[in-house]
Image (tube, rainbow, N blue to C red):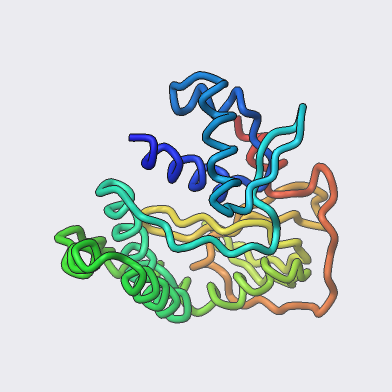
Amino acid sequence: MRTLRLFSLLDRLRASRDPIAAEALARELDVSLRTIYRDMASLQAMGAPVRGESGIGYQIEKGFFLPPLSFDPDELDAITLGMRLIAAKGDGQLAEASRRVAAKIGAVLSSDQSERFANSPLLAVTRGSAENRKSEAHLSGLRQALRERMFVMLRYVDLKERESLRLCRPLGLVAFDDVWVLTAWCEARADFRNFRVDRLLSFEATGKRFRPERGKRFEDYLKSMR
């Protein structure tokens, strides 16, 4: 039981970018604060790269490598479905990347888990709609523009067949059942706009990068939707 809890602590710390207070860990694992202190001391004594600071919390030291994760059955199902959904719905490069990730995960699992992972009966299938096929032509380039925070010039036709040319900051891509949607900050409108990727006539990366600005970020858009 304690061994499982130690692994859970490492998994929780690895998943967080920020320090986690001992009190929060105690609540999540339903144990006492003293137990968390004792477990953290044990992890540190075993050589785990865990740093704790009073009043701040615990975190994994940057630059350290931890051994591969172990997964419970539900976690393994989530990974399986996630990888297969990306392979079915993503553009060619993203689909191939998902297959490489799946292969890497399979290689570090135990033989029993690896077999279940490879032969899982869980499938993800898309209808292969015309909208998805049109989107595929732009998804790879848009993902690159997102990563590099690159201004893009979009030539777009809306649902009323009105064509426009927009200089935008690409902020996020969302996969809906039938379509991909690009959320962007439109420089001309000085506001957020959503564009169906299948209705893009073309787009061009300008070569000019932008910096995140408060009020113009993807997280700002998501907050405005609440």
Q: In the displayed structure, does residue 148 sit left or right of residue 188?
A: left
**Residue 220 appears in the picture as rendered:** yes
Q: Quadrant of the N terminus?
A: top left
| Image mark count | 0
**Residue furthest out toward the front:** 45
Q: Residue 87, image x and y in percent?
A: 35, 71
Q: Residue 164, image x and y in percent?
A: 69, 66
Residue 97 sits in which quadrant? bottom left
Residue placed most toward the observer, 1 or 81: 1
Residue 129 sits in which quadrant? bottom left
Q: Quadrant of the C terminus?
A: top right
**Residue furthest out toward the top:** 32
Residue placed most toward the observer, 45 or 169: 45
Q: Residue 150, image x and y in percent?
A: 76, 70
Residue 20 sits in which quadrant? top right
93 over 31 or under it: above or below: below
At a point 68% along the width and 68% down the height, the residue shown is 147
Q: In the displayed structure, does residue 69 sit left or right of residue 140?
A: left
Q: In the displayed structure, does residue 88 sit left or right of residue 199?
A: left
Q: In the displayed structure, does residue 16 sit left or right of residue 85?
A: right
Q: Residue 94, image x and y in percent?
A: 46, 74
**Residue 133 appears in the picture as rendered:** no
At a point 53% along the width and 61% down the height, the residue shown is 66
At a point 61% along the width and 34% down the height, the residue shown is 225
